[in-house]
Image (tube, rainbow, N blue to C red):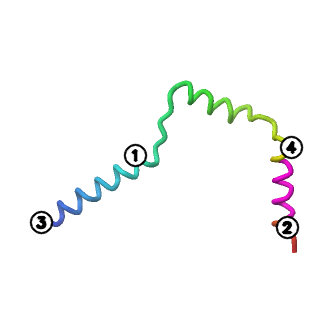
Amino acid sequence: MTAFFVVAAAQAAAQRAIEQAEVIRLSMADQECCAQALLSPPKQAPALKRAFARRSKLLHAE
């Protein structure tokens, strides 16, 4: 019976550690900034456009 409680306690501790690692906590200002970036992303820079074009060319090359 003691082994059950040890395993249960270890499992609970592991679950808490996973939750803390997966949750991102942002201030209200950071939340607003993130939402604004998703709603109105900046225009792609020329270098990013070239990188996407090169990636596409590499992936579709046969």
Mark 3, Cα crowd under 10 Å, few <14 / some 14-19 / many 20+, is few
Q: Which mark is residue 60?
A: 2
Residue 18 placement (x, y as % from top left): 40, 52
Q: Earlier in the sequence, mark 2 or mark 3?
A: 3
Q: Is residue 52 magenta?
A: yes
- Look at mark 4 in the image and give the residue it sits on: 46
Which residue is painted at 23% across and 59% down in the image?
A: 8
Q: Secondary structure at mark 2?
A: helix
Q: Secondary structure at mark 3?
A: loop
Which residue is painted at 50% across and 33% down in the image?
A: 26
Examine the rendered structure and indicate whether residue 52 appears above or below residue 44: below
- Look at mark 3 in the image and give the residue it sits on: 1
Q: Which mark is residue 20?
A: 1
- Alpha carbon separation for disc pair 2 and 4: 21 Å
Residue 32 placement (x, y as % from top left): 60, 27
Residue 48 placement (x, y as % from top left): 81, 47
Looking at the image, the residue that sits furthest to the left is: 1
Q: Secondary structure at mark 1?
A: helix
Q: Is residue 7 magenta?
A: no
Examine the rendered structure and indicate whether residue 25 appears above or below residue 51: above
Kind of residue sitting beneath label 3: Met
